Image: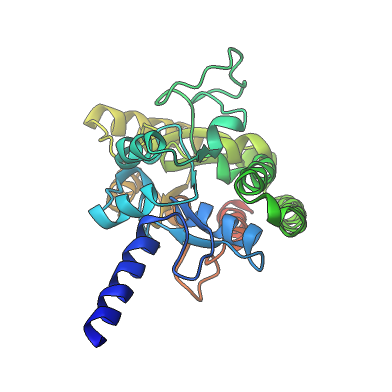
Amino acid sequence: MRRIALISSILTLIAAACSGTTGDGAPRIVATTTILGDITTNIVEGCGPQVTTLMPIGQDPHAFQPSANQAATLQSADLVIANGLDLEQGLDDVLAGAEREGVPVLRVAEQLDPVPFGRHASATDGAVTPGTLDPHVWLDPVRMADGVDLITTAAIDRMPDLEACLTDRGGAYRDALVATHHRIEDILSAVPDERRVLVTNHDSLGYFADRYGFTILGAVVPSGSTLAEPSPADLRELVDAMRDAGVDVIFAETTEPARLAEAVAAELGYPVDVVELYTGSLGAPGSEADTYLGLLETDARRIADALAP
């Protein structure tokens, strides 16, 4: 009898693992990045669904490669929240496989009026071509307020019996995100127009710059992906541009080593600060950036502190 009970328990666990629900019957939502995981958790918290975030804190989403267990987690989800636009390059095949198995995948960035790299005009043809449109939409909180609506709607579509709770939670979080946007405007008001020039580690702050009136002078890695490598000519061109503009700050990223940024700074021949921002991942628990809203305000404060006179 004891052996039969043990076998029964094992079969129950296997069935739960292979279904889209958790062991206690709660719907399972899987988010790819820590930022999407935090947003989704805030939307569904208290409503019943459980959220699993694939990427660990500090992970560069461009470079993430899933384990076999993580791929299985995606394929057994009730709903997957992804960024899209080739941000999670290592997940593209796994996400496509999950969709073939009937798992709904919401690629949030593709529905938030994505902008081509290096341009301030929105795409006009409606086509979303991975690799040409900037995936870093979460660094514009106004855009991501619409992203909250998308995630809320996707959750309701899968769990219509939870509509009232999800609508309330999603609306409250949207309001909190808009309030954060206004606080960021206040924080950045200390930066004069002539100092609103950004040099970044890679081309990730375009949406932020558009929203808050900054200009991107250049990037240490002149690409929308951290997987690219700058040539010596690229670095020389950036040094010359910074020297001509008198720029004395480079914004690096917590998910990437700052050695290239520090090398560029050393070439300029005058004091240059290298300031880390949280771009692709939340900060560690207890940091000022361990939530998405905290990340946005922390980055704004660091930018203001570095550029204000």
Quadrant containing the N terminus is bottom left
Instruction: Decide if residue 201 is on the left or right side of residue 293.
Output: left
The single residue placed furthest to the front in the displayed view is 1
- Above or below for 113 versus 76: above
The number of callouts visible is 0
The single residue placed furthest to the top in the displayed view is 125
The answer to which of 153 and 147 lies nearer the viewer is 153
Image coloring type:
rainbow
Look at the image and tell me whether residue 216 can be seen: yes
Instruction: Decide if residue 166 is on the left or right side of residue 259.
Output: right
The answer to which of 287 and 100 lies nearer the viewer is 100
- Above or below for 200 versus 297: above
- Determine the residue positioned at 28% across, 39% down: 227
The answer to which of 242 and 282 lies nearer the viewer is 282
Look at the image and tell me whether residue 213 can be seen: no
Q: Position of residue 281 (x, y in %)?
A: 45, 56
Q: Position of residue 46 (x, y in %)?
A: 66, 68
- Above or below for 117 versus 256: above
Quadrant containing the C terminus is bottom right
Q: Position of residue 270 (x, y in %)?
A: 39, 49
Instruction: Decide if residue 203 is on the left or right side of residue 175.
Output: left
Q: Position of residue 144 (x, y in %)?
A: 64, 44
- Above or below for 218 versus 282: above
The answer to which of 77 and 194 lies nearer the viewer is 77
Corner quadrant of residue 56: bottom left
